[in-house]
Image: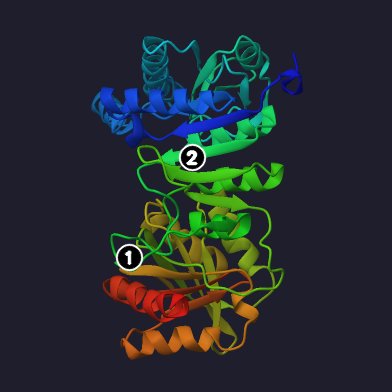
């Protein structure tokens, strides 16, 4: 049966781990689903593991083995979402709602063979569509799927968000709602900036930059997929009936330039390769070698230093594992002089469509930071974001000053 044969539109509702962390929250989620169903739609619910379950399971694995096999780790970690899906299905049935739970495999989510970081290849939603045709609520375990060998795989960080968006795309859903412990996407981290305000709507590209640069509401992979398949996306509260933030394809003002948010990211470190020969192919060798080591590079700056040599600096996630021997080998391979690692940095990201082409915005950003006596280590810009690398100790002060000067002042 094809999803288009269903007589009612489909809504996908994803509940994060904090939204199903206790039996009472699971019962709250069941009531939210029941209320949505009354509006005349089919509901597919995607769930994360309860609260800290994934971390606890990972801790158990580390107590057994310093390097648990990835296959067995996937089997273990997938149990967290299975627990959530079964309990939520029970809660729905307890209030008289027909419901059926599915693992990622049962739901037809087929992935590649990369354990712990699998990518979704395609979805066969036949069983889910059949359940919806019987007017059942489908409760799907997020974060997981199965590969061509029918092995259980997990999708890595943000996997449940990705599961929800992928299923919404496969079903042609009218809406994919990410329900969490915040009311929407904010113009800055409300824990840092008192004046942070909820954003009514964002473009896919703006949300993608925010997700990749410190905003923790949505994972970047899910936003990429939503943009690719034009999935209507909303981020909203799982416990409060509020509109949330809509993620849309286009804003109405075609060339309007507006600073939407200031995000912060402490989980980074800077690596500099000093006095590298300024010859063709050196950068290719450096970043090819980093790719083979599985290093995800966030920002790259090359600065001419002296006598035909350059310093090449790049920023990587703070949990990147690259040891001294690997750095020594990398410097030796490209004929450099030395390497320096600085873990006391942070990223300040100013995000908005077209901000780098708007005269005066960069100057305003740098003036605000200068008035705070904040030194800029590195600067990077694109059409959507201007990123400043600063000392970690300046991050909170810089975030507050930029938000006040660029967003709160603009709002007034």
Q: Which residue is mark 2?
A: 178
* Front residue of this view, candidates 346 and 15: 15
Q: Position of residue 408 (x, y in %)?
A: 40, 75
State the CA–CA distance, disc 1 to disc 2. Answer: 33 Å
* Front residue of this view, candidates 142 and 256: 256
Numbered disc 2: secondary structure: strand
**Front position among marks 1 and 2:** 2
Q: Position of residue 40 (x, y in %)?
A: 59, 25
Q: Quick check: 398 above or below 294?
A: below
* Residue 242 can be seen in this image: yes
Q: Position of residue 197 (x, y in %)?
A: 40, 63
Seen from this angle, which residue lies furthest left? 63
Q: Residue 257 vs residue 179: left or right?
A: right
* Residue 65 can be seen in this image: no
* Residue 78: quarter of image: top left
The residue at 52%/72% (across/down) is 259
Are discs 1 and 2 less than 8 Å apart at CB?
Answer: no
Among the two numbered marks 1 and 2 on one chain, the one whose residue lies closer to the N terminus: 2
* Residue 105: quarter of image: top right
The residue at 56%/82% (across/down) is 309
* Mark 2 burial class by Cα count in 10 Å: few <14, some 14-19, many 20+: many
Q: Which mark is residue 397?
A: none
Q: Quick check: 389 above or below 361?
A: above
Q: Residue 82 vs residue 110: left or right?
A: left
Q: Which mark is residue 343?
A: 1
Q: Position of residue 252 (x, y in %)?
A: 68, 63
* Front residue of this view, candidates 26 and 61: 26
Q: Residue 402 vs residue 330: left or right?
A: left
Q: Quick check: 247 above or below 1?
A: below
Numbered disc 1: secondary structure: loop
């Amino acid at each position: 049966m094809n999803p288009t044969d269903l007589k009612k539109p489909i809504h996908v509702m994803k509940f994060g781990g904090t939204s199903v962390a206790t039996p009472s929250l699971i019962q709250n989620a069941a009531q939210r689903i029941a209320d949505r169903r009354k509006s005349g739609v089919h509901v597919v619910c995607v769930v994360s593991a309860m609260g800290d379950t994934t971390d606890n399971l990972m801790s158990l694995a580390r107590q057994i083995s310093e390097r648990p096999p990835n296959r067995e780790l996937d089997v273990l970690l997938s149990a967290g979402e299975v627990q959530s899906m079964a309990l939520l299905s029970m809660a729905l049935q307890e209030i008289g709602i027909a419901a059926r739970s599915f693992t990622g495999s049962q739901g037809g989510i087929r992935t590649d063979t990369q354990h712990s970081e699998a990518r979704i290849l395609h979805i066969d939603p036949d069983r889910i569509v059949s359940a919806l045709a019987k007017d059942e609520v489908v409760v799907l375990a997020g974060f997981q799927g199965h590969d061509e060998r029918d092995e259980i795989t997990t999708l890595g960080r943000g996997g449940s968000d990705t599961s929800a968006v992928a299923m919404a795309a496969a079903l042609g859903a009218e809406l994919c709602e990410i329900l969490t412990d915040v009311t929407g996407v904010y113009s800055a981290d409300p824990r840092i900036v008192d004046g942070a305000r909820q954003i009514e709507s964002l473009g896919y590209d703006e949300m993608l930059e925010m997700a990749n640069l410190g905003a923790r509401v949505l994972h970047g992979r899910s936003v990429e997929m939503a943009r690719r398949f034009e999935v209507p996306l909303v981020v909203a509260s799982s416990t409060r009936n509020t509109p949330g933030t809509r993620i849309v394809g286009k804003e109405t003002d075609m060339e309007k330039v507006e600073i939407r948010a200031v995000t912060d990211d402490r989980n980074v470190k800077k690596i500099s390769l000093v006095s590298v020969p300024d010859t063709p192919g050196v950068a290719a060798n450096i970043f090819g070698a980093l790719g083979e080591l599985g290093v995800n590079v966030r920002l790259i700056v090359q600065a001419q230093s002296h006598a035909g040599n350059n310093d090449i600096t790049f920023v990587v996630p703070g949990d990147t594992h690259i040891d001294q021997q690997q750095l020594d080998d990398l410097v030796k391979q490209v004929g450099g002089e030395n390497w320096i690692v600085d873990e006391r940095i942070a990223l300040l990201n100013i995000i908005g469509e077209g901000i780098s082409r708007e005269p005066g915005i960069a100057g305003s950003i740098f003036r605000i930071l200068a008035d705070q006596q904040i030194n800029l280590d590195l600067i990077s810009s694109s059409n959507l974001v201007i990123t400043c690398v600063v000392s970690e100790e300046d991050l909170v002060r810089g975030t507050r000053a930029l938000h006040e000067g660029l967003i709160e002042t603009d709002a007034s």
